[in-house]
Amino acid sequence: MQGDATDLAAAIRHGRLSAAEAMRASLDAARRQEQLGAIAYLDAAMGLASAEGRDRERQSEPEQFAARPFAGVPTLAKDLGGPFAGLPVAAGSCLFERKGGEADSDLASRFRDAGFCLFGLTTSPEFGLSLASEPAVGPICRNPLDPARTPGGSSGGAAAAVAAGIVAIAHATDAGGSIRVPAACCGLVGMKPTRGAMPGGPSFGNHLAGIASELAVCRSVRDTARIFDRLSGNSRGPFPDPSPVDIGNGRLRIGLLADTGSVYPTEGDRLAAVEAAARAFESDGHELVPLSWAEFERSATSSGRAFADIVSVNLAALIKALALDESRAEPLTQAFAARGRALPATMLWDTLNEAVLVSHNLWALFDRVDCIVMPMLSSAPLAIGTFPSDHGDTDLHLERMTAFAPLACLGNISGFPALTLPFGQDEHGMPLPVQIMAPMAHEPRLLLLAARLEAEERWQHLFPVAGLPS
């Protein structure tokens, strides 16, 4: 597997390398792979100071150090979400200057308490409006598995940095597939948690009417489980904290969706991977329950519409609240803001009510099945430039994103947890991802099922983790 954040943390904990050595290795890797465009902002001094602080803690307070699951592990925050103190988020836009930096969000504080050492921000499209990460302000982020292709978006820089081994794990956000799409493009594990599971305070600046969530892109299921366990709960937000469901070892009903319809078809090799994953569960004695696209089509359409309306209105409100000079933004950003301003309140209200029905309809499906295995992407990662932002046609842009990831928004709008991981590779060496969805608070089941698929070792990371001893 070429290592993960858990391996790197263990190496630091057992003295095989120091946190400072791990940080220097990440900084060296970042410099060597600068052309990848994964990192939008780097602060080497911050990273080294944080790492040296962890090394001092290891000597003076070893029990406290050992209690941090990722003590000394270098990582990067996304240039959207957070915020993390000292890291000046610009949301991939020239509308913000990279100076200063807000205080830690609740989530950022938990990242630090887990032992992570931060040293920069990863590339995001302007205001997270794309499934590619190519902001006009730069840099253009490329997929380390094939630099001619996108690493996805909007957490594309995070996924590229992790897949390339610059860091073993990285902060990411997901409002319309933005953790899962990049993870799927780069051969990583990405999970969007249950609505309300992750802290969004104190400002809730990335709340987006409840559709956004934050976590990480990871190289392994165990890293995903470990960081979710450490960061989730006691979110102190507008939703009750989901209590993780105690799962048993009984026979499960595995819903299989191996079709995304004729309008947004998924390529055969990707559907075959989804079916192979479901068959793996069947071989363990679980029951397969075939599901049809007709059972999802309306919810998928409603989810896409809700995503578009919510992000448009949010962007319009942000620009007004901060008195930003919108004329300096990318043409597509300007068009989304205009779309938000033009949206009648009654139409937004209808959209939000329709989103409630998406959740209700999914609950009805989960009366019949315990989880659903489905496609994540319709094709291999697309070429750089496939999602241009130099135009104002928001409908065309949304159509392109839906065609690439037809089911990405479903988890965000419904509030249900969803996880993607690679389950094989295509003829060009690109990952064949599958997505698993489960009822709210069923992350333990998602992670258990994902670990079962990961154990087949159908995917191997191309690049080792910087600094990890052989």
Image (cartoon, rainbow, N blue to C red):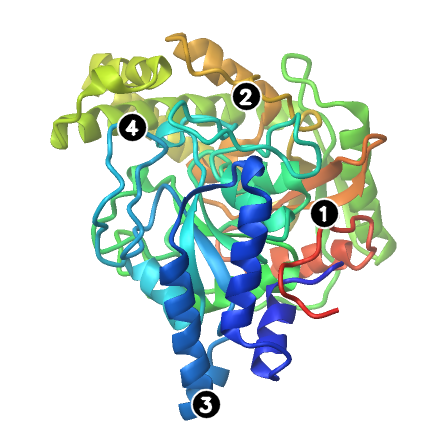
Which residue in the protein does label 4 denote? 94
Disc 1 residue type (three-letter): Ile
- Disc 3 element: helix
In the rendered image, residue 170, in percent from the top left (x then y), is placed at 50, 53
In the rendered image, residue 421, in percent from the top left (x then y), is placed at 67, 47
Sequence-wise, the earlier of marks 2 and 1 is: 1
Which residue in the protein does label 1 denote? 254
Disc 4 residue type (three-letter): Cys
- Disc 1 element: strand
**Residue 209 figure quarter:** top left
Is the C-beta separation of discs 2 and 1 under 8 Å? no
Q: Tell me the number on the disc at residue 59.
A: 3
In the rendered image, residue 154, in percent from the top left (x then y), is placed at 47, 34
- Give the mark toward the camera: 4 or 2: 4
- Give the mark toward the camera: 1 or 4: 4
- The structure residue drawn at horizontal position 61% and vertical position 69%, both measured from the top left corner, is 8
